[in-house]
Image (spheres, helix red, strand yellow):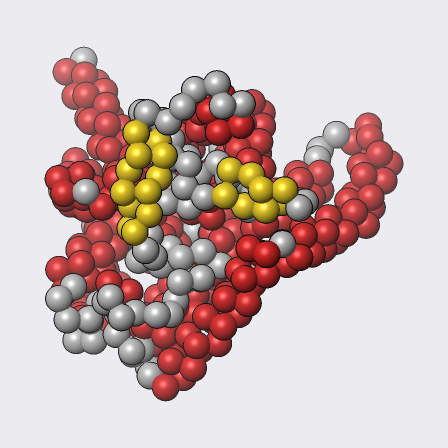
Amino acid sequence: MCVNKNMIKMGKIQSILEYIVIILLILEFNTPFSQYGIFAKIIYYIPIISIFLLLLLKGKKIQMKFWHLLLFLGSIIPFLNVQYGVESTYIRLFMLFLPLSILYFSNYEEERNVILYKYTNVILIICCVSLFFYIIGSTLNLISPTAYVPVFWGEQRIYPTYFYLYFEAQNSFFLGNEYIRNCGIFNEAPMYNMALCIALAIELFLREKKRKIVLCILGVTIITTFSTTGQIFLCFLIFCAMWNAKNKKHKFLKFMLLTLMLLVIPFVINWILQDKVSSSSGEGSVSARSYDIQKCIQIGLDNLFFGKSLLSEQNPNHNYGFSNSLFALFADGGLYVLALYLSGLLFIPLYNMTRKKFFKESIVLLLYFYLFSITVSHFRYLTLLFVAYGISMCINYRQYGK
């Protein structure tokens, strides 16, 4: 009886710590909260402490393998090429958070998805709040912003906010009209869209019992971000859902719907992209993204193995890597650091899929790679968590995936 009570107590502590990690990871994922004094300190350091405490809960059961030590030692090399003045940021990200996250997933392998389920639960709450204020505030103008917050995002900006639970951070042109984009608690709509898409992928592919209402709320919220990436993402997931339908009584209907989707989706995607390019803001966005990618590739080729300088975006004179993560990472960290991300988000998932191991988890990782490639998120805790998630599957392959 005493043992059962202790297990229940430990389970509750574990759940609380995991929620703390997830909430702070979301707040660190380019939100205004990560820019202010004591809030920034809490957001940056409490997740590391919480993951360390989660490992302590395992006690003597925690397993350290050769690969854990090798990855930690490997993280020391790029430290020599870190932008001056941000050494502590590198240590926090790559020498503390990432190794601890890999250890966490390696030692909680049978519960590896639990923390991701908590992520979808937190994002769901943010969705409901943002939809409420987006409809009655930004769209219907039934209430006014309660405050105006200074935020540095590329430049100094002022964001109207509703009780600090929702920010009007960005406008966009869609079908020739200007709309306020639903940015939730994030600095811009693409960041919110990425967080939403990942939650949708987790809910659709990893959770055993699909929650249809949650899928609908996430889908509607993605649409309100007016993100081209999100709309293409939704089209892809709709296609996947139809392809995996198990209702044998409607095979012909399924075939017809899939055929229709294959015909319609390319036109929908083309229409979205054309509308994006034809608008004034969209044209600037496309040309700026193209120029930025070319510049990142050139810098990466000039500094092939170790990049120009990690975390260089914190330099006021930094003028590249503002449109995507993949090429910005190549420019800053070279092939050495890029290989770490590609291993966790691309190569290991593809390898596991060929071996028919961790198939659903690998799909989620590949979808994260897609979003990561075109959104600036490479030095964020959430991205490193998914990199650790992928790498841990390789470390535990012989033990857990056989």
Residue 295 vertical position relative to residue 381 in the rendered view, above or below: below
Residue located farthest toward the top when viewing the structure as drawn? 1
Residues 269 and 68: in front is 269
Residue 51 image position (x, y, % from top left): 20, 42
Residue located farthest toward the bottom when viewing the structure as drawn? 302
Residue 373 image position (x, y, % from top left): 47, 60
Q: Is residue 388 left or right of residue 360?
A: left
- Residue at figure coordinates x 34%, y 57% from the top left: 154
Residues 8 and 193: in front is 193
Q: Is residue 391 left or right of residue 361?
A: left
- Residue at figure coordinates x 59%, y 46% from the top left: 173
- Residue at figure coordinates x 59%, y 50% from the top left: 228
Q: Is residue 362 left or right of residue 339?
A: right
Quadrant assignment, res 339: bottom left
Residue 245 vertical position relative to residue 291 in the rendered view, above or below: above
Residue 13 image position (x, y, % from top left): 20, 27
Residue 22 vertical position relative to residue 165 in the rendered view, above or below: below
Q: How many marks?
A: 0
Quadrant assignment, res 89: bottom left
Q: Is residue 16 left or right of residue 178?
A: left
Residues 308 and 242: in front is 308
Is residue 15 visible in this depiction of the protein?
Answer: yes
Quadrant assignment, res 61: top left
- Residue at figure coordinates x 49%, y 53% from the top left: 371
Q: In which quadrant will I find the N terminus?
A: top left
Residue 252 vertical position relative to residue 129 in the rendered view, above or below: below
Is residue 339 visible in this depiction of the protein?
Answer: no
Residues 233 and 395: in front is 233
Residue 240 image position (x, y, % from top left): 66, 43
